[in-house]
Image: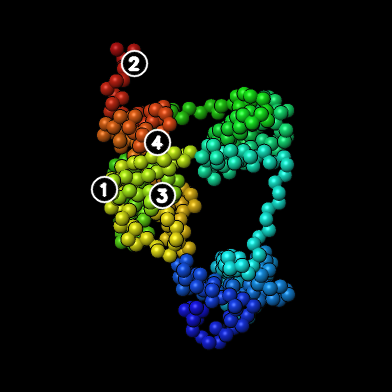
Amino acid sequence: MLETYFQASKMLGHLRSGPSGPYLDGFAAALERQGYSGDTAVRYLRAAAHVGHVMAGREASVSDIDLAVFSEHLRTCRCPRASGGRRNHHTIFGAKLFRRHLIEIGVCRPAAVAQEVPVELQLITRFKAWLRKHRGASNRTIKLYAGDAVRLVEELGADPTGWEPADIRNYVTDRASTCGRGTVEKMTTSLRAFLRYLAVEGHCRAGLDNAVPAYAHWRLADMPRYLSTEQVNRLIAACHGETGACRRDHAIILLLARLGLRAGDVAQLRLDDIEWQTGSLRVSGKSRCEVRLPLPQDVGNAIAAYLECRPTISESDRVFLRTIAPCRPFRNGSGISSVVKRCMKRAGIVTPIKGAHVLRHTAATEMLRYGVPLEKIGLVLRHRGIDTTAYYAKADVALLKQIAQPWPEAL
C-alpha cells in the first residue's frame, strides 16, 4: 500500500525497515479509506515513521508511543530524514493518527483509564445519568449542567443536607458579578435543575431551587433577530454550485431557512429520517421529542442532489458529513453554524447575529408574514408553549399598527 504514495525504492526500504515499518501499509490503507489527499497522507506516513524512530531511540517500542515525548523531541529535532517542518501540525497530528490506528488494531495500548470519580463527585455522576435518562438531555447540555453543579458542590461542600438558601443565593450573585449575561442565564437554569434533582432524591431540603435568584433580563423586550427576504435569497444563491461542499451547504441552508430547524437537529439528521414516499422529515429535537415535519419540494431536491455526491467512504448514516478528511459527521450543531457563517460571509451579509439560529428566527417571521397562526408556527418550531412562539408576534409590524392606540397627548 505504501507504493501508492512513494515510488522511490530507497524511501520504501527506509520506511519498511524502521520500527513503524510493519504497520505503515495498514496505516496507509486506513488513510486512503478516510479520504485523505495524497500529499496529506505522505506527511502523516512520514510522521508515523518518525515517531517510531524516536521511540526506538528511547528504547521503547511502537506499542509504547508517547506523544508528549515526541512533541518535546520535535522542539530540537535534527533527524536527517525528517524532511519538511519538524514541528508542525501535520507531524504531530500524523503521529496521533498513527497511534490511534495502532490502538484500533490492538498493537498500542489505549490511554490510561481516568481515575475513579471521588466520593464527593459521585452525586454529579448520578445527576448526569438522571439528565440523560429522564430528561433526554444531549451530551452538550449534560456537560454544561454538570459543570455548574460541580462548581456549586466545590463551593458549598459535598453534603447538600447542610446547604442554606442564603449560601446558594450568595454563590450565584458572586458568580454573576464575574460572568456575562448568557453565562448567568445558563447557570441559573442548570443550578435550579440540579437542586430540584437533589430534592427529589432526598439529598437536600425541598424548595432550594427557589433560592437561585432570577436574572433581571426580559427576553421579550427585544425584537427577534432575522434576515430579510432579500438576504435569504442572497444566502441561498451563495451556495449554488456542483461541488459536494456547495450542494451540502445549499441543503443545510434550505433546511434551516424553510423549516426553522435547530443546528443540532440538522447535525443529527439521519438517512432513515427522510421519508421520501410521504414527503416528510422525522426530527428529534430537545428532550428527544420526535415529530414529523413536511418536506418542501426545494428542500427535498437539494438533499437529493447532495446525496448523489455524498462521500461514500464514511459508514455513518448521518445525512451531512464534513467535506475534508476524515469525512465524519458533524459532532454537534457548532459545525452547522460554522457552515452558515461561512455562507453569510460569502454572500456579503453583515448582521449583528450570525449562525444557524438566525435562520430559525427568519423562518418563524416569514410564516407569520404569510398569515400562519401562532399555534401552527409553534408546531413547526416544536415549542413547548405558545408563550415562546408569541415572541415572534412583534415582528408583524403592519398588523401591530392596525391595533395600536394613539397616545393620549396625540388626541
Colour theme:
rainbow
Looking at the image, residue 156 lies above or below residue 258: above
Which of the two discs, 2 and 3, sits closer to the camera?
A: 3
Q: Residue 238: x and y, percent?
A: 32, 53
Q: Amino acid at mark 1?
A: Gln
The residue tagged with tag 1: helix, strand or loop? helix
Q: Which residue is mark 4?
A: 382
Q: CA distance from mark 1 to mark 3?
A: 18 Å
Which of the two discs, 2 and 4, sits closer to the camera?
A: 4
Confirm or deny contact between disc 2 and disc 3 (CB under 8 A): no
Q: Amino acid at mark 4?
A: Arg
Q: CA distance from mark 1 to mark 2?
A: 47 Å
Q: Which residue is mark 1?
A: 297
Q: Residue 379: x and y, percent?
A: 36, 34
Q: Earlier in the sequence, mark 2 or mark 3?
A: 3
Q: Earlier in the sequence, mark 4 or mark 1?
A: 1
Return the residue nearer the eye: 245 or 33: 33
Q: Residue 325: x and y, percent?
A: 47, 64
The residue tagged with tag 2: helix, strand or loop? loop
Q: Earlier in the sequence, mark 1 or mark 2?
A: 1
The residue tagged with tag 4: helix, strand or loop? loop
Residue 118 sits in quarter: top right
Q: CA distance from mark 2 to mark 3?
A: 50 Å
Q: Which mark is residue 269?
A: 3
Q: Earlier in the sequence, mark 2 or mark 4?
A: 4
Q: Which residue is mark 2?
A: 407
Looking at the image, residue 304 lies above or below residue 92: above
Q: Amino acid at mark 3?
A: Leu
